[in-house]
Amino acid sequence: MNPTIISEDAVSLYDISKELKKIKKRDEELNIRTKKLDEYLNNFLELKQKQAEELEKELTDLNIPRLKELHIKKIVDIFPDNIEGLKLVLNAYPLTVSKDNLAKIIDVIKKYKSAEQ
């Protein structure tokens, strides 16, 4: 039997965190892998769920050419605070983004960085 892919969706760490909260409510005790995942997420997620969703929406609303949902979710996950960091995130993909658009992305992120502190 060969498995078939039904759909392929980008998933952020915040999406995983949301699902993990549902699992916590459903199950009384988490298994060892789920506990490790929860610990990892608690250490690395910088925003609250609602803030991450708002940031994702704002980045989507910029309508930057060739910037897809996958890229936006990765930007939200990594949460870079300067253009060099953003370039490092986007270097993982065959994608070019203009300097002006990089600056727009960083401006949006900075709003959330300042709100976080």
Image: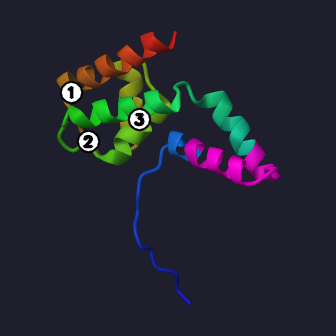
Look at the numbered discs 3 and 1 and tell me whether their residues touch, using CB distance below 8 Å: no
Residue count near mark 3 (Cα–Cα under 10 Å), binned few <14, some 14–19, many ≥20? some
Q: CA distance from mark 3 to mark 2?
A: 17 Å
Q: Which residue is mark 3?
A: 53
Q: Is residue 81 above or below residue 74?
A: above
Instruction: Please tell me which residue lies in front, 19 or 110.
Output: 19
**Does 93 lie within the magenta span?**
no
Residue 91 is situated, as x and y percent measured from the top left of the image, at 37, 38
Quick check: 104 left or right of 30? left
Residue 79 is situated, as x and y percent measured from the top left of the image, at 45, 27
Quick check: 92 left or right of 61? right
Instruction: Please tell me which residue lies in front, 116 or 70.
Output: 116
Q: Amino acid at mark 2?
A: Leu
Look at the numbered discs 2 and 1 and tell me whether their residues touch, using CB distance below 8 Å: yes
Earlier along the polypeptide chain: callout 3 or callout 2?
Answer: 3
Label 1: state its secondary structure.
Answer: helix
- Checking the image for residue 83, the label placed there is none
Is label 3 or label 2 in front? Answer: 3
Earlier along the polypeptide chain: callout 2 or callout 1?
Answer: 2
